[in-house]
Image (spheres, helix red, strand yellow):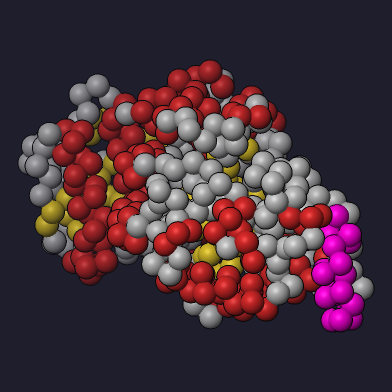
Amino acid sequence: MDKIPVIIPSPREWNKFSGDLILSKTCQIVVDCSCAEQLAGTAQVLQEAIRAETGYPMPIIHIPEPANGDIFLTLNCSDKELGEQGYILEIDDYIKLRANTVIGIFYGGQTFLQMLHKIPTHVRVPRGKVRDYPIFPQRGIMLDAGRKYWGMDYLYKIMRQMTRLKLNTLHLHLSDWNAFRLQSDLHPGLSASQAYSKSDIASLHAYARQCHITIVPEIDLPAHATVISRYDPSLAFSCEVMSKVCWPGGESGGFTLDYTSPKVRCWIKELLDEFIPLFDGPYFHIGSDEIAEPDRPEQCPGLVDYAKARGYPYITDVLVEWINEMNAFVKSYGKQMQIWNWWERKPHSLTPDRDILINAWVGAGDPSLFLEQGYHVINSPEDTHYITPGINLLPDNEYLYERWSPNTHPNMLGYKLCVWADGYEDEPDEYFETYLHQPLAILAERTWNLYVPSRPLETFLALANKVILS
């Protein structure tokens, strides 16, 4: 195989042909007539991007065959190994981009755009054939929007950067101890002064659809809920061991909602009822971790009495019962529920429903327990995949690039970087980019291809800056 083009993430296969193809002002985007409707939106996105690179008009037409120099898009592809996100890009007398799905066409377009961008004239690309597909279906980032409000323009910017790197999952952590970042009609006093309106959510989804990015919303429950109990103190545990915790926001109490209370469970469902329908993706995340410090739940009389009344041998069973009740509620909206791992740290006789998607983070984020039990997992180990400048918890780029071995179990859906704003809640959005760009590019590279890249880390990071900031 010839030397792979210098793009991020590196294509899986590249066979170089002789010479280069030079685009001209007469080039057109030709969409296969048989899939014109399916590819209309993606063709327009590609048209705008190529216009920005070349200055050429690049009209979109629908005919069965392209002419020399054209860009031909088709879903007429029988390569099942490409899956939903793979593509084949052939550059010869014309450019032929084929895939099994629209997403594959979109990603093939991103590869072509990077190849076009790296040449100073922006009109020349090497002739050859790329065959490419990712190893993990989900690759993304989480932004801590509970502690810190991220401006809408910055969220659009992040999605553009994700697109260049073929990252496809944006997890928004929308509540935490200090702020509830969704404007509520039902509970207007709950929302922070800086919060996302329903029209903001609709706009984010519209942009995400163009970028083929899935937004995963999270309302963190039943813990990290100081802002909720401040709004309505009756919702929190009355026992101090569940109310006050060592984590930020828990010093004064009200950190965990009383998930033994039918009233509280009903209130939570009413809250979720307002927001779950706003998000058109397949997931909804409800947190479920750090409910209290170790061994403290056993000291809460209300929890002990509830567990005894239900015949549960362990206090943690009450948390799992609540998780499964919430799962049934989230599923009633046609969504798959996600949670952070936590319940497994204490003895339990109940287990969360197997159709819940586990986000493994604590305990070095070791996903093996959950994978062995049949759960699907998204992995973000806190010691390697957290970006938390406020407590100096940052990724080791050299480790991620050269020594990290991602888990390839069939139930491992993918990996994400988590950007937490602890202690830096008031910093401007751009402040975090210093810490984010390089590990984000490394994550894109390693979760698409798996193998350790052959080019030196310094060379890769220099390329990453050009790709992300272009």
The residue that appears at 11% across and 57% down in the rendered structure is: 61
The residue that appears at 79% across and 60% down in the rendered structure is: 239
The residue that appears at 45% across and 59% down in the rendered structure is: 189
Q: Is residue 113 left or right of residue 141?
A: left
Q: Nearer the viewer, residue 257 or 295?
A: 257
Q: Position of residue 200 (x, y in %)?
A: 32, 55
Q: How many marks?
A: 0
Depicted 190 relative to depicted 302: above or below? above
Q: Is residue 414 left or right of residue 117?
A: right
Depicted 304 relative to depicted 48: above or below? below
Of the 4 image quadrants, the one containing the C terminus is: top left
Q: Position of residue 272 (x, y in %)?
A: 51, 70
> Looking at the image, can residue 107 be seen?
yes
Membership of 302 in magenta stretch = yes
Q: Is residue 308 left or right of residue 104?
A: right
> Looking at the image, can residue 449 be seen?
no
Membership of 439 in magenta stretch = no
Q: Is residue 303 left or right of residue 155?
A: right
Q: Position of residue 105 (x, y in %)?
A: 34, 54
Q: Nearer the viewer, residue 215 or 199?
A: 199
Q: Main secondary structure of the magenta part?
A: helix
Q: Nearer the viewer, residue 372 or 62?
A: 372
Which contiguous range is marked in magenta?
296-312
